Every structure is written in C-alpha cells, then in structure tokens.
Amino acid sequence: MFEVVSNEILAENLHKMVLVAPRIARARKAGQFVMVRLAQSEERIPLTIGDADPEAGTITLFIQAIGASTRKIVDTPAGGSIRDVAGPLGKETHITNWGRVACVGGGVGTAVLFPLVKALAEAGNEITTIIGGRSSRYVILAEELGALSKNLLVTTEDGSLGSKGFVTGPLGEMIADPARAPKAVFAVGPVPMMKAVANMTREPGIETIVSLNPIMIDGTGMCGGCRVQVGSETKFACVDGPEFDAHLVDFDGLSDRLTSYRKEEAQRHAATDCKIAKEVAK
Amino acid sequence: MSNDLSPKERMAIERVHMPELPADERSKNFEEVNQGLSPEQAVAEAQRCLQCKSRNCVAGCPVGVSIPEFIDALASDDMPRAAQVLRGDNALPAVCGRVCPQETQCEALCVRGKKGDAVAIGYLERYVADWAMQHPDELLADKIPEPTGKSVAVVGCGPAGLTAAGELARQGHKVTIFEALHDTGGVLRYGIPEFRLPKEIIDREVAVLSRMGVAIECNVIIGKTLTIPQLRSEFDAVFIANGAGLPTMLNIMGENLKGVYAANEFLTRVNLMEAGRRADSSTPILQRDEVAVIGGGNTAMDCVRTARRLGAKRAMIVYRRGEAEMPARVEEIKHAKEEGVEFIMLTAPVAIVATEDGWVSALRCQRMELGPADDSGRRRPQAIEGSEFDLPAGIVINAVGTSANPLLTATAPDLTLNKWGNIVTNDEGETSIPGVFAGGDIVRGGATVILAMGDGKRAAAAIDKYLKG
C-alpha cells in the first residue's frame, strides 16, 4: 500500500498527488514512470513521475482524470492509499546542455513534460516552453513551467487563453528565426501534435525527442503490448523508451494501436455510467 | 485398505484415468479441467508401483522427489507420511502435480512403462499435495530450524524463486522475495491459465512459505527500484530468478496491427488482470471468432485454449513442424483437441494481413515439409514453394518464445552474460559475482516450471553451503 500524502486539484480534472514511495523517490530520474493500480481488479496504468523528494521519500504524480481508471485514482483523498505503485520504469531522459531548447506540451502531455523541463533547467538550458490545449480549462501547469522557463507561450484552440491556434504555431516561428531557433525540441502530447512537431523539425535537422504513451500492461518489457516502430526496429516503449527520436517514430502506427480497445472501453464506460445513474436514482 | 500385495497383483491393476470436466462444458469456462483422483483411485494407483530397487523415477525428477517413498506411504493410506515425504523434497508439489511434463521425466523412466503404462506419478503427487492443503491439522510438524542469522534476497516470485525461498527458509535463513508485479507466483500466475492451475493453489503454496517466515515484497523491480549491488550490500546472498522476459518478435509484415498479441500480453490480460474472466475487471481483452496462435509449446496451448474459452469459434494452432515435434505436454495437446482446437501443422506464418482500418483479417501462411534433423535433433521444416494461403483470423497470437529481459542485468555490470543476454552460472548456480546465484529462465532461456524449480533447489543448497562455509 502506498499512502497518499496530498491530493490537490490544479485545474479541472488535473490532480497533483503526492505519494509515499521512498525507494522510487531515491531511484527516480527525469523521464521515468510508475505503473499504478488503485485496487484489486483495477487496471495497471503508466503515469509519469512528475517530481520526487528523496529525503521525504515521496513522489509526485500529475494525473489528468480522463479515463475510468484515472478518475478513480484521483478520488483517493489524502490519508488514503493506492494498492500498487511500481517503478521507476523506462529509461531516464538524456539531459545535456544544448543551450536553447524548446519544450512543447499538449493537453495531459504537459504533465509529462514538467520533469523534463525541470531537469533541462537544472542542466542550464535556456528554455522556451510552449503549452496548449483546446481551451483555457485544458492548459495546465503554466505557473510551474513558467518559473523554470525563459519564455512561456500558451496557445488555445478557441483563443480563451494565450494565442489562438496550436502549439506548432509559436514553434514554427521559433524555428524560422535564426536568433531563436532551438538546438533541441522536446514534445509530449497527443500523437498528431507530436507528429506535427516531428515534421517541422525534420527538415532543419533539429534533434527532437518525444515521450510516448502506448498501451501497456506490465511496464517491464514482458508483454510487448507497448511496441512501437522506430526506424527499422520494433521497440518496447516501457524498456527502450518512453522517449524516442521523433524523426524515427511511426506515429500513424502508434495512433492506430491506441484505438485497439476503443469499443471495449466505451462499453465499460457505458456500464459504469449506467450503474452510477442507478445508484443516484436510488 | 491393505498394501500387502504381490508384484503380480500390483501388475494387474490398470492405470487410473484422471476424471475431467466434459470438454463441451469446460471449453466455455475457466474451471480446472482435471478434477483430481478419489481416495480409492489414488491408493489403487499407488499400489501399481512395484517399489523397484532401480528408482529410475527419482533420477528423472529435476527436484529429486523421493517418489517411491511418498507413493509407498500413499499405498498404505498413510497420508500424513506421504505429505511429509513429498513436501520435504518439493516446495510446490500441488503446482508440479499439475504442470510438470511427467511423461518425459519421472514417468518416462518408470519400469512399468516398459510394458504397459507408467505409474501416474503426477496424479499421485497432486493428490497428496491437495490432501495436505485440505488437512493442515493432520500434517506432521516440520522441524523448526535454528535461525542462522543470515539473510538472502530472492529476485522473482516464480517457481525458481519460491522453491529457493522454501529451501533456504528450511535451513534457518531469513529470506525476502522481491517481485516486480503486484502479485506472487510469476509465470504460475500471469502465464498458466486457471483451467490448468487454479490461482488458489498458488495462494496456498505461497501461504506455506509465508508461515515459514519468508517475506514477500511485491512492486519492487530489481534493476529499477533497487539494484543487484544494493541487494548484495544489504543481504548475505542473492538468488536471481527474474524469469524470461521479452517476447520474441516474428519479424513479419503486419506484426503491429490491431489484434496481434504476444502470448505474454494475451495471457497476462486474462490470467493476472482477469480480463474476460471477471465481469468487473477493468482490463479489456479482444474477442474474435477466429483466433490463430503461432507456436507449438505449452504457452501456445494455453493461449489457444484461453481463446476458445473467451468464445472463439475457430481456435487454431499454427505450427511449422509436425505434431510429433511439438514441445507441448501430451496432455495439453489432448485437452486442446477435445475442446475443439484445430491443429494446422507444417504451416509457418509469412505475414499478417490487415483490413482497411488496420485490424487483423488473416494470417498469411506457407506449407512446410520436414527435412533433415537440425541442432536440436528435430527435423528442420522447409518451405514448400508456391504453397501460400490466407487463414482468416481476427486475432493472431505470437507464442514462439521469449528472450532475456535486460532490466536487471543492465544495472549489474559485473554479471557475466552469454550472447543472448542470459546470466552465466556454474553447475551450482553461482554467477560471476561472489554470493550472487541465478536460476530459471533468466539462465536457461525459455524452459519449464520444473526445471526452474530444480535450479532453485540446487542454488539454495549452494547458497546454504556458501553462507555456512
């Protein structure tokens, strides 16, 4: 059992959860994740470790409650507990001082981006962080990322916060301007966003790293469910990743595999919602 | 019941048939197929044993169970003694009695098998182990060992780790097992389906170890959460038994399509995460009418029989050699056939064919014929030109094997590995790091439960010697 120290709501559906996990806190490096299972018969789901305090023996998870499992996890109050937390898994981010870097986050990917920005800042990089979402409600961690970045740019599709449009807009302007062009780009978000970023940086040859979140069961390389085509090789995101060279990732294949259980999940959600409705009716 | 029989009378008894759930009933549920012997059946079968002097059966057992002794006690209906003998030699007898390939081990060497049928040693082992679980109050008390003050870390809670832990605890050492997953048993739980090995059996075997003082910590991934150098500094010895690991890919077109599973993923979803078995499981599993499983081992049988139970109308084994070359246990093949599994032999996959929207629609196959024997002594399959055909399938499961998982070894640079990434040990299981031993699939590559247990037992003896030396 892993005790929940605190559970704050940062934005709609976005929780910052601090857990007691001393061994993970000591071993953890930026870019790594944990497998979390709330209780018996619940799913194992991968969540990026947002931050850790080795001395306090705690890890911080930023959890966007969008699926049935994440919704249940964020319902656990401080003082409650999570049955299983295993990690840290995946390879640590390769961090160096590139000089000028751009960090691009879309939606919940922004939470995955946070520890990378922190590690890049600690290594002395000059960071421009570009984050976006459908509307202001989906833009998260702006304040925290702003504190670590030289520039923070926000985009929303409806223009309710920052500039109207996609994160690729400001990134394109940076790349086009020799005085601002980044030496490296880190991008985490929905697959189409990461694909778009990869396509923008391929031509100018800017090193670009993406963090992938495919379907995963054990997280230790055993099941092969998280396989993704990277160049000519099949890689397992859990042990070979989750970060890969964006210019080699088969985003279309990844995107397609992510839809494997759409029908099954829709049925389960319908069943759950139906059950809740019945309970409410009582 | 008297055990005072002449050899002639013993020879006259016919080998027992294991009572089974009817195939049409069991192919729709996950209940255990083999129902176990009745007391009368078990005693009569035990009386078939001639108690011969050669004791070949013991030599055929990777953990060296005193087979004639436990069978003699059973033939005399002395269950407490039978249980004591069996448990003294085997930490997981209820598991072995269900999943060991007895027909190639103990039973293959039984003198009665020379003319007629071998004694059903596996069935008897299961009978005695199950009796022991159901009659804890009648068991003869184990000697409580003197604590040695030494501690041992065991990496992995599968068959090798559990066996080593039991043996070491019996010697008075303090044992802690570290398990990467959220539950115990390793491949016994995530790999072997409920209809062959009920999860309750694993729980009970693990509970026996816990009562012996073995501590089990789940959710600890050695190589990630802690490393071998850390364990080495905190414990007097370490036994690594973290299993096989990564699925071997087929490297054919279409392998990443939706509906293509590696056996480990398919089985883990159903066995460990209870997908398709419990209505309230949050883990989904795909269900299709036509399921093609590639491979001929026990894992392939487990996949195809699971697919059948999840509702597949055509559950098919696709294997590039013939049935005689299949590595699966004879009983699994028999059970699968009874349950309506189709065996498509001398057939190799060439590609996986997709629908327009990226789902599997067929497995493209090629007919094979057997040529001369290869290094493994089996006849090598050769493709027949122009024999390609498409086998309609909505799910394709790759059950061809696994390769060494690098998670642990990547953070233990002093461990010597072979070219496949498996840990190199001497005959006693000691690795290149003093005080660190290894066994099971991480040493052997993909093997069986019982060979892993044999490694655990041998390594435990070596660790005991090392700690007392």
Image (cartoon, rainbow, N blue to C red):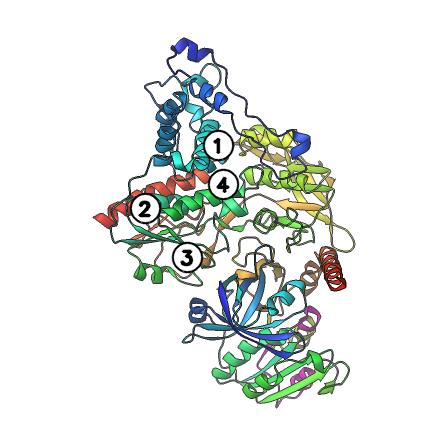
In the depicted structure, whether residue A106 falls above or below residue B337: below
In the depicted structure, whether residue A106 falls above or below residue B417: below
CA distance separating discs 2 and 1: 26 Å
Q: Is residue A277 left or right of residue B434?
A: right
* Number of the front mark, 2 or 1: 2
Instruction: Kindly check if marks 1 and 4 are in contact, taking CB atoms under 8 A apart as contact.
Output: no
Residue sitting farthest toward the front: A282
Residue B234: image quadrant is bottom left
State the residue in front, B56 or A170: B56
Q: Residues within 10 Å of mark 4 (few under 14, many from 20)?
A: many
Which residue does the numbered mark 4 point to in the structure image? Answer: B201
* Number of the front mark, 4 or 3: 4
Which residue does the numbered mark 2 point to in the structure image? Answer: B168
Which segment is the magenta one?
A165-194
Of pointers 3 and 2, the one earlier in the residue sequence: 2
Q: Position of residue B462 (x, y in %)?
A: 29, 44
Instruction: Kindly check if marks 2 and 4 are in contact, taking CB atoms under 8 A apart as contact.
Output: no
Chain ID, mark 2: B
* Number of the front mark, 3 or 1: 1
